Image (cartoon, grey):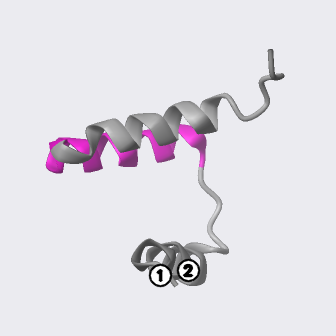
Amino acid sequence: MYFTDRGIEELASRRGDDEVTLAWLSEQLQAFVDLNPEFEVPVERLATWLARLDDEDD
């Protein structure tokens, strides 16, 4: 198991029953990047990937 997998599993176990809006998630991602600017690129890539999940492949 990769280190990051444990974080994902912890998120699912602690917050898996929560319901959130995408606006709330966007705010949390922005707050995280504000506190940790070195993670801006991967967070932006994740946000872009999530935003385009339903796009058809060209």
Q: Residues within 10 Å of mark 2 (few under 14, many from 20)?
A: few
Residue 44: quarter of image: top left
Please say if the residues under marks 2 and 1 sit with CB atoms less than 8 Å apart. Answer: yes
Q: Is residue 20 left or right of residue 30?
A: right
* Residue 7 at x, y percent in the picture: 44, 75
Q: Main secondary structure of the magenta part?
A: helix
Count numbered badges in the picture. Answer: 2
Q: Which residue is label 2 attached to?
A: 9
| Type of amino acid at the residue the image marks with label 2 | Glu
Q: CA distance from mark 2 to mark 1?
A: 5 Å
Front in this rendered view, residue 34 or 58: 58
Q: Camera-side residue: 14 or 1? A: 1
Report the amino acid beneath label 1. Arg
- On residue 6, the disc is 1
Residue drawn at x 38%, y 48% is: 28
- Against 52, residue 19 (above or below) is below
Span highlighted in magenta in the image? 21-37
In the displayed structure image, the side of residue 24 where residue 55 appears, left or right: right
